[in-house]
Amino acid sequence: MKEGKNDCFALFVLGKGVSREVIQLFGMNSMRNINKFDYINMIEVEDLKVVEESLGYMICEIVDMIENDTHTLFIGKLIEADILKDEEAMSYSYYQENKNELIKETTKEGKGAWTCTICGYIHYEEDLPEDFVCPKCGVDRTLFEKREI
Ligand code: FE
């Protein structure tokens, strides 16, 4: 039935305890600029990538697509699913309500947070050293933006 990975999609559920890295990477970057899946640990299921930290996933075969002005709605038939961790799921409203808290946790002691504009990596330090390079994607400090939290 399945002819290739374009005929299927993967949905995965993140938990409330998901790492800050994943939140930053997915919440503050666009796939138009970077391939988010290159910067965090992924597992492969049916040739599709699933975030390793996920609580679980659903692999669906595309059976229909409905286009409207702003979105494309994919209708899928579930072909495989699994639970990886038994923890509480993070809803979009939980994320919106707690976004600042989720990020603030590591900025104790008034440290600044520098975000790599290329891969989303966050470095918690007041100032970046001159020779600082992103440990994930290798760009230099000029591509980091400071965020005061
Ligand atoms: Fe980076």
Image: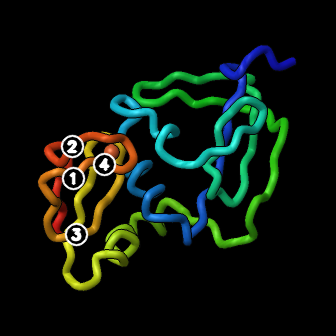
Q: Check if mark 1's residue and mark 2's residue have beta carbons within 8 Å.
A: yes
Q: x%, y% of residue 65?
A: 62, 22
Q: Is mark 1 within 8 Å of ligand 1?
A: no
Q: Nearer the viewer, residue 78 or 48?
A: 48
Q: Which disc is residue 134 wearing?
A: 4
Q: Secondary structure at mark 4?
A: loop
Q: Residue at x 60, y 65 (%)?
A: 15
Q: Residue at x 35, y 75 (%)?
A: 106
Q: Earlier in the sequence, mark 4 or mark 2?
A: 4
Compared to residue 134, the image places residue 125 above or below, namely below
Q: Check if mark 4's residue and mark 2's residue have beta carbons within 8 Å.
A: yes
Q: Secondary structure at mark 3?
A: loop
Q: Earlier in the sequence, mark 3 or mark 1?
A: 3
Q: Quadrant of residue 97?
A: bottom left
Measured in 3D between alpha carbons, the distance from the residue under mark 1 to the one under mark 2, in whole angstroms, is: 6 Å
User: What is the three-letter code of the residue carrying label 1?
Assistant: Phe
Which mark is nearer the camera, 3 or 1?
Answer: 1
Q: Quadrant of ligand 1?
A: top left
Q: Give the residue number, with chain letter if any, for mark 1.
A: 132
Q: Earlier in the sequence, mark 1 or mark 2?
A: 1
Q: Nearer the viewer, residue 60 or 34?
A: 34
Q: Check if mark 1's residue and mark 4's residue have beta carbons within 8 Å.
A: yes
Q: Secondary structure at mark 2?
A: loop
User: What is the three-letter code of the residue carrying label 4?
Assistant: Cys
Q: Which disc is residue 125 wearing?
A: 3
Q: Nearer the viewer, residue 16 or 110?
A: 110
